[in-house]
Image: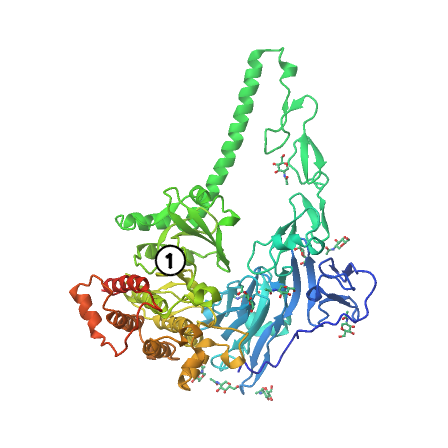
Amino acid sequence: MHLQILFALVAMIALGAASAQEPYCESSCGNVNITFPFGSGEGCYYSSDFLVTCDRSSVVPTPLLRNISNLVISNMSTSMSELEIMMFIARDCYNISGSVRRERPWLRLGDIRISTKNRFVAIGCDTHAYFSGTRGNASDGSGCISTCGSNSLIRNGSCSGVGCCEVAVPDAMSSFEITLSSYYNHTNITDFNPCSYAFFVEEGKFDFSSNNLRDFGSVQKMPMLLDWAIGNTTCDTAREDVDNFLCKENSICDEDYEGPGYRCRCNEGYEGNPYLGCKNIDECQLQNHVCQHECIDTVGNYTCKCRKGYSGDGRKDGTGCTADQSMTIKIAVGSSVAAIFVIVFVNWLYFGLKKRKLMKLREKFFKQNGGIMLQQRISGDGGSHDQVKVFTIEELKTATNNYHESRIIGKGGFGTVYKGVLSDNRTVAIKKSKLPDQTESQIEQFINEVVILSQINHRNVVKLIGCCLETEVPSLVYEFIPNGTLSDHIHNKGKSSAFTWDIRLRIATETAAALSYLHSAASVPIIHRDVKPANILLDDSYVAKVADFGASKLIPMDQIELATMVQGTLGYLDPEYMQTNQLTDKSDVYSFGVVLVELLTGKRALSFDRPEEERNLAMYFLSSLRKGRLFQVLDENLQKNEDLKDIIKVSKLAERCLHVQGDERPTMKEVAMELEGILASKIQKHPWVQHPLNEDEAEYLLKEPTNGYECTDGANGNSSTFDSMSKHTILPIASGR
Ligand SMILES: *[C@@H]1O[C@H](CO)[C@@H](O)[C@H](O)[C@H]1NC(C)=O
Ligand SMILES: *[C@@H]1O[C@H](CO)[C@@H](O)[C@H](O)[C@H]1NC(C)=O
Ligand SMILES: *[C@@H]1O[C@H](CO)[C@@H](O)[C@H](O)[C@H]1NC(C)=O
Ligand SMILES: *[C@@H]1O[C@H](CO)[C@@H](O)[C@H](O)[C@H]1NC(C)=O
Ligand SMILES: *[C@@H]1O[C@H](CO)[C@@H](O)[C@H](O)[C@H]1NC(C)=O
Ligand SMILES: *[C@@H]1O[C@H](CO)[C@@H](O)[C@H](O)[C@H]1NC(C)=O
Ligand SMILES: *[C@@H]1O[C@H](CO)[C@@H](O)[C@H](O)[C@H]1NC(C)=O
Ligand SMILES: *[C@@H]1O[C@H](CO)[C@@H](O)[C@H](O)[C@H]1NC(C)=O
Ligand SMILES: *[C@@H]1O[C@H](CO)[C@@H](O)[C@H](O)[C@H]1NC(C)=O
Ligand SMILES: *[C@@H]1O[C@H](CO)[C@@H](O)[C@H](O)[C@H]1NC(C)=O
């Protein structure tokens, strides 16, 4: 269905420099001011990505980005590195006879990107919407599903999957393509909801109303924010090329965001366009100061002065201005003592009040984030949760050197992850999430997850150490895993050749064991929902640790499936879940199947650099397997491997995990057992590896007959790998009981 993109909105146009140019740089067009790096004449803009043309054919001139007639710029803020455009919305419309009208806008932007200050929103009662695009070399995407099962659940202003759904936009996406589809072709609902809609919209600029289900047809465009980065180098490299460095005087170079390139920002105390040079802000004139008596503007700042006969720093947030004691010294020593007393008292009162205000705020956040509930849950359970620690803001600030930039180890749509060192010298990862405002039930769920996760004690699951509830959005503290993500190791060419089959098989086995444990062994079944190599961390000896439970759901004991808003990562999302909204543990099995395929092929789950039929790795893998062409897709580092039989077994297992029908997929427990079997038979082939087996385990390991394969020697899997492997194999089996 999605092949018929009937509406190709914007074409990537190679702009010739030959067109006629005005000799000056236009400074505005209609209501929009245009400044460098944007511009319209020759030499007025930085690169063709930043070309703006002014279309004067209508009453109000409209600025167009890259001279593309549909790409209308509605606002521009060079100081914020932001650009607002009016972007078409995607729609899929049906009538009673089931015929469709489709409009699917897409955009490729180059140096300009989609700002994370947008949301991706879909409206409809039978609506699957997702977007995909590129972030640097990689592909990314996300999506959501909206249904109206029962109309009574539709709420104005809420996009939580009933009538309307929304997801965050990842950092640094430079293109997008929206795909809309429906499960029942809007059958039976065409009278009140004939269409599905999807669009990117600036946060706060769209408020869902139940009437939109019927009347959104008249809306053509939505405001969408773009931002940009210059070039593909770091600030330091860019600075070396003095002539082409764009950050002009009084500005700083900023590279504190995902993706290549840099941005310029005015220094504090300056304003204007950092790409042209920032100007001093006259804080005194703007009444933007804290002086008690007199304000004197300085370059980049201002100072305060007290009137004659007064002294102090003159700042309302400082000591202020107080009458000079020298004038009154003759009167009495006593009165000056009294004056000092008054000053001290006033200060004490002031700071005391300020401190109390801060404490109040923290208390508010603590309550708002469910701190009370958490405390009750912890204390009510007889201290069995002694692992979960509630941290204060100070502790986390100290641990992360006040959230210093150098401590950032990860960033994304979910928030920022910092590396920190606690007072007891433990290294931790601190995740500051950026959740949207939470409802009561979401808080309860968050607390639930904190409590449950803190109870999980599995060597292949990242351990939650504690949380901090005093900040506006709660922060989570995890154990620190030093060796990066599985995704790095698979896709980084330097690392992937050393990433042998043995290591891959063991990581797969450990991940399966962890997921199986979450599904069945943990006290309340947990569905991870976002299983992918980027969420599997590796420690120094390549032990897999499943991480990021941001999306996970607890499944109440009496339910085997749960209707939820579809969340996850495109390329890993279970197609059945996308169609039905019904979340089951088999959705994780599907995603794990994709992880297996990624381990086998070394290819990304979704890549728009590949030909159409190979874009979705899972589909490509399955079709290759069915055509008997497994070796065409296998990672070249695995091609010469002696363990081909194992590779084939794992491929067959992946095929079963990727079955379209969830019921046909094996459970995570079966997957884990099978992988453990394959791994165990491998150990059997290496009699020199000694490991302490107890009888039970030996029996289990012997159940899988060895095949006639002889492994040569330590040449392609040195003995230390096997050694550590054997250690790792036994434990998951043991803990699975
Ligand atoms: C555009 O520039 C003019 C003059 O420099 C200024 O007065 C006006 O406020 C600007 N408009 C916008 C929308 O920034
Ligand atoms: C913009 O496009 C119009 C028509 O598509 C063309 O006539 C015009 O020369 C273009 N302007 C620039 C600056 O490329
Ligand atoms: C344009 O952007 C500026 C800066 O972000 C903002 O202050 C202003 O309100 C915007 N104007 C409109 C009409 O949205
Ligand atoms: C449905 O739409 C098609 C084409 O858009 C049109 O030919 C047909 O008459 C419509 N059917 C009804 C019942 O409106
Ligand atoms: C992007 O691709 C180029 C060439 O294909 C490669 O040199 C570069 O390392 C890649 N960058 C990342 C971040 O993967
Ligand atoms: C939402 O607001 C509109 C008016 O803006 C109203 O007509 C409609 O009934 C409201 N819907 C719900 C579910 O409250
Ligand atoms: C939806 O429409 C397509 C063609 O437009 C058709 O092939 C498909 O069977 C329809 N599905 C349902 C559930 O009506
Ligand atoms: C549409 O209505 C018919 C008759 O009431 C019903 O049999 C059918 O299941 C409905 N289809 C959907 C998709 O709800
Ligand atoms: C960086 O940009 C330059 C100039 O646009 C280009 O020649 C070079 O290939 C780019 N490098 C990468 C790694 O993308
Ligand atoms: C301005 O001066 C005040 C007081 O001297 C100082 O605290 C502040 O950091 C200065 N601001 C800048 C941007 O330098």
Residue farthest to the right, as pictured: 23
Counting from the top left corner in percent of width and height, residue 619 is at 45, 79
Asked whether mark 1 lies closer than 8 Å to ligand 5, one says no
Residue visible at 47% across and 79% down in the picture = 183
Q: Is residue 492 visible?
A: no
72, 647: nearer the viewer: 647
Residue 57, image quadrant = bottom right
How is the structure coloured here? rainbow
Count of numbered badges drawn on the protein: 1
Viewer-proximal residue among 241 and 253: 241
- Identify which amino acid the numbered label 1 is placed on: Asp
Please tell me how crowded label 1 is: few (under 14), some (14-19), or many (20+) other residues with Cα within 10 Å: some
Callout 1 secondary element = loop
At horizontal 42% and vertical 87% (from top left) the residue drawn is 627
Q: Nearer the viewer, residue 598 or 244?
A: 244
Q: Is residue 701 left or right of residue 438?
A: left
Front residue of 394 and 727: 727
For this orientation, the residue located farthest to the left is 695
Identify the image quadrant of the C terminus: bottom left
Coordinates of residue 573 in the picture (x, y in percent): 44, 72
Q: At 71% across and 34% down in the image, what residue appears?
A: 296
Q: Is residue 135 above or below residue 446?
A: below
Estimate the x, y position of residue 732 in percent, counting from the top left. Answer: 27, 64
Q: Is residue 136 visible?
A: yes
Q: Quadrant of ligand 10?
A: top right
On the picture, is 570 further left or further right than 675?
A: right
The percent coordinates of residue 701 (x first, y second) are 22, 70
| Residue that label 1 marks | 539
